[in-house]
Amino acid sequence: MDKLHNGSPADLLEVLLDAAPAFDRRSRERLKTGIEALLAANRDLAGRAARVEKERDALLAAIGRQGVVYDAAGGVVATGPGGEDRIARALSGLGSAPGEGSLRYPGGGPVPPADLPGQRALRGEVLESCRFVVHDRPGEDLHVAVSASPIFTDGAVSGAIVVWQDVTREERTRRRMEEANTLLEGLFENLGDIVGIQLPDHTILRYNRAGYEMLGMTPEEVHGRKCYELIGRTGPCAVCATSIAVASGKREVIEKWVPELGRYLECRSSPILGPEGEVELIVEQLYDITDRKRAEENLRESEATARALLDAPADMIALLDTTGRIIDVNEAMARQFSRSREDLVGVSVFGVFSAAAAEVYAARLHEVAGLGRPVRVEETWKGRWYDTVLYPVRDAHGAVTRIAVIDRDITDMKWVEDALRERTHDLNERVKELSILYAISRIAEQPGNPLERIFFEVVRMLPSGWQYPGDTVARITVEGRTFETEGFRETSLRQASPVVVNGETVGTVEVCYLRERPERDEGPFLREERSLIDTVARRLGRTIERFQAQESLRMSETKFREIAQQSFDMIYTCYNDGGITYISPAVMRILGYTPAELIGGRCRDFVVPSSLPAWKVGRRKIAAGEPVEGLEIEFRRKDGSTAFLELNESPIIQERTVVGVHVVGRDITERKQNELLRQQAFGQIERNIEQFAVLGDHIRQPLQVILGMADLLEDGTAVATIQRQVERINGYIRELDQGWVESREVREFLRKHELA
C-alpha cells in the first residue's frame, strides 16, 4: 500500500487489471474514477493532518510547553513543537550517559527510569504539574512542570501524552522572592526606628526589635494588645495616625508629644488594602524626633532673630550660593524687584538681569567664591547708583559656600562722590583692621598654640591690614627673638609700637613700606593704622602675660602637689560619683594604707561606728555648700587599731551643685591620748585631795582623845612622852594639810588654763 500512496490512477488501474483481467471498459472507467476520488480524499486527509500537527506545535510553543506522545510500548510516536526548544534539547539526553540530560527531583535525587512521567502514564497514572529538574547540556539546570495522561483504547492503555513546561524563570522568581522576603525580614528586624504591624482596631500583631526594646516587653507580652494599652492608656490617642489612615485609606503622618515616654514622636501609618479596597493592616513607623523638635524650636527662634536683623536695615541684602541661586532676601531687596520673597527664593540671580549684567555678576561671584575675598563695586541699575558688596561666607572647613550681597542706594549722596569714595576706602581699611584683630584673637586664643607660632602667624598677616599690602613688610621682635615676613627690610617709611609686658618693654612691632607712598596722617600711614599697630602690640603683650600667668599657674599647681605630697597632714579629694580621686602619701603614716589602696574608695568605709553620727553631720553641711572645721573623727587603721583625725573640709562646687569635697586631716591621736592622761591625772588629784581631808580628820580626833587621857595619868614622864608623840603626829598632819592645799592650787591652775 505504501507503493500505492502517491501513485497515478493509471498505475493503480494497471495493478487492478492485472489482479482482475475480467473487468470491462465501463467497469474500468468507473474503477479509475473511484480510485482518483480516493486518492484526492487521501491527499486532503494528509494535508489536514499536517495542519493539525502545526497548530498543535504552535499552541504548545505559545504556552511554553513540549509535548510527547508515546505508544503502548513506550516508543515516541510524536513530539512537538520541535527539537529547538530547551526542554526538547534537555529531554533528548534522558537515558544517555550519567550527568547529561539527567532528570532529578527538586530535592536533588535522581528519577529512576520506571518513575519517568511517560512510564507512569503508561501504567495508567495521571500526573498534574509535577516538578522535576532537567540537567541541560550547557550545564544549566531547567526546572520543569510535567503533566501526563494515559491514552485508553477499548479500555486498555494504548499510549500516553506527556506535556513538559519550562518553569525555570518562575522557579528563579520564587527563589528571588524568598531571598527578598528574607532580606526584608532582616531589614524589618534591624531597623533603628520602631516599626509595628497592627489591625485597624489598634491590635498589635508584631513589632520589630527596636519596638520591643523601647517597650521593654517580649513579643508574647505585646501580641494581641492595643497600642495605647502598652503605654498605660485606656483609649486611643486624641490625634492618632492609625485612625486617620483607616479612614482615609492612605498613608498619614503626624507629630505629637507622648508624655508617658517624655518624647516627641513622628508617627507614620501606612494602610495595606484588601482586594475590595478595605484596610486590612496598618504598618506604623515611629521616629524619635525629640532632638529635632527642640532643634527646630531653637532654629525658629534663631531664624526669627536673623529675619529681624535682616529686615531691619534699609539696605538690600541677598544671600546666594556659589552658583548664583538666591537663598534668601530681605524685604528691601524684594521690594526692589517688585516680587515677594517666596517668588525670589530658589531663582537664579542671572535670570533677573540682562545677559550683559548677568555676565558681570557671574564674574564677581566667581571671584568671591574662588578667592574667598569680598568684592565691592559701585554700579547703576534702573537709573540709580548702588554700592554693592559681595562677601564670602565660609563653612566650618573654611570653604566658601555662600555669598552675601549687600546693595546700598547711594544716589542721593553721589554729589559727595569723592568724599564718599574716601570714606568707603576708610571703611574697607577698618574692615581689614577688624579682620586682622579678629584673626589675631583667633590665633592667640587657639588652644595649644605656642608663643612662637602666634608671633609667626601674626606677623604673616599684618601686611593685609595696611593700605598697600603688596608693598608692606612686618617684623616682630620679642626678647631677642625675631619674626618677620618674607623679604623684610627696614626702610624710612616705618611705623613701630612697643610690646609691653607687666609694665616693661620686651619687644617691638614694626611695619614698613618698601616704596614711597603719599603723605597721610603719620607719614604715609593712616591714623587708624597707628591705632591698629598699637592694638596689635598691646594684644601681643597681653598674650605674653597670659602665657606667663599660665606658666606660673602650672608651676603653682606643681608646687602645691609637691607640698601636698610632702605634707605631714593627710590631704585628699573625694567626689560623690567617683570616690577618692587623690590622697597624699601621709595616709601611709596615719592609717597604714598606700594611696593606691584608697583611690576609688569612700572614706566613710574607714570611719569607726562611734564616729558615724558626727561624720553624717559633716556630710550634711558639705551637701549644703558649707565648709566644716575641726571635725574630730576616729578612723580604723589597716592594722586594726584606730586613729583620731581632725578634719577641715571644703565643698567642691560645679555649676552650683556640690559634686565632692576637699579634706585636710590632721592626726590628733597623740593629743587625744594626752588629754586622756590629763583627765586621769586630774582625777587622781581630786581623789588625793579628798583622801588628805579624810585622813586629817581621822587622825586628829583620836589624838585629841589620847591627849585627854594623858592628862589623867600621874606619871609625868609618860605624859611628856605621849605629848611629844602627839605633837610629832600633828606635824605630819600639818604637812598633809600643806599637801592638800598645794594639790588644790594645782587643780585650780589646771582648770584655769583648761588643761583638765
Image (spheres, rainbow, N blue to C red):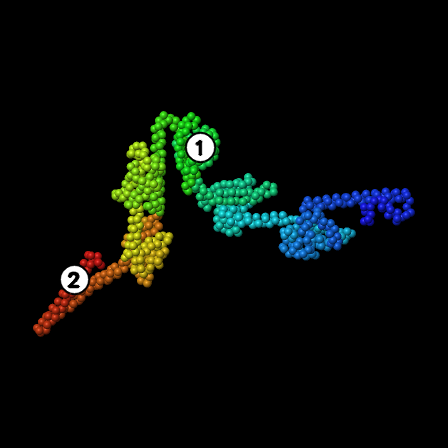
Is 61 on the left-hand or right-hand side of 173?
right
Q: Position of residue 143 (x, y in %)?
A: 64, 51
Q: Position of residue 657 (x, y in %)?
A: 35, 48
Quick one: 545 or 254, which is closer to the camera? 545
Q: Which residue is mark 2?
A: 742
Q: Residues within 10 Å of mark 1 (few under 14, many from 20)?
A: some
In the image, residue 457 above or below residue 97: above
Task: Point out the tag, 1 or 2, that comes first from the N-terminus.
Answer: 1
Is 86 on the left-hand or right-hand side of 683?
right
Q: Position of residue 621 (x, y in %)?
A: 31, 51
Is 504 on the left-hand or right-hand side of 456?
left
Quick one: 182 or 397, which is closer to the camera? 397
Q: Residue at x 36, y 56 (%)?
A: 600
**Is residue 340 among the parts visible in the rendering?**
no
Q: Which residue is mark 1?
A: 361
Residue 408 position by quadrant: top left
Label disc, if present, on residue 287 of the rendered structure: none
Identity of the amino acid at label 1?
Answer: Tyr
